[in-house]
Image (cartoon, rainbow, N blue to C red):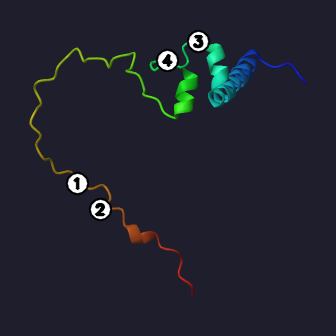
Amino acid sequence: MGQESTPALIRRTLAVWLCASLLATLAISAVPQWHELIHLDAKAPRHECAVTLASSGNYQQPAPLVAAPVPVLQFCFVPALHPVWVASPFIGAHILEHAPPALV
């Protein structure tokens, strides 16, 4: 096996770690005794962790951490729109002028 570049090694390590953590979460959610070994308050009604979210099958997405930017300038004046006629650039294109050659 040849030498690997650092970004590729980091990506591969991260992918292996994420897959292992997902599989461990699913395994622990299948066996409640294992969950109780990790968390002492696993049976508490307000206990929430990755294992309880995986075992319940759903989760509520938390509020966003970053608020949407508020525009500094408020545009209170909108100019009136007036219709303007513009000539079509395709009128003089002669669409049928370049037909395939006729069979003789």
* Residue 14: quadrant of the picture: top right
**Foreground tag (3 vs 2):** 3
The residue at 50%/20% (across/down) is: 48
Quadrant containing the C terminus in the rendered view: bottom right
Query: Quick check: marks 3 and 4 in contact, CB under 8 Å?
Result: no
State how far apart marks 4 and 1 are (Cα). Answer: 73 Å
Residue 33 image position (x, y, % from top left): 66, 22
Amino acid beneath label 1: Ala
**Foreground tag (4 vs 2):** 4
Q: Which residue is mark 3?
A: 40
The front one of 35 and 25 is 35
**Foreground tag (3 vs 1):** 3
Amino acid beneath label 3: Leu
The residue at 12%/30% (across/down) is: 78
Q: Which residue is mark 4?
A: 44
Amino acid beneath label 2: Ile
Query: Quick check: marks 4 and 1 in contact, CB under 8 Å?
Result: no
Which circle marks residue 72 in the picture?
Answer: none
> How many numbered circles does the render carry?
4
Q: Which residue is mark 1?
A: 87
* Residue 17: quadrant of the picture: top right
Q: Is residue 72 toward the left or the right of residue 94 in the image?
A: left
Vertical comparison of 53 with 44: above or below: below
Residue 94 image position (x, y, % from top left): 37, 67
Q: Which circle's residue, 3 or 2, is located before the other in the chain?
A: 3
Amino acid beneath label 4: Ala
Vertical comparison of 100 with 19: above or below: below
State how far apart marks 3 and 2 are (Cα). Answer: 78 Å
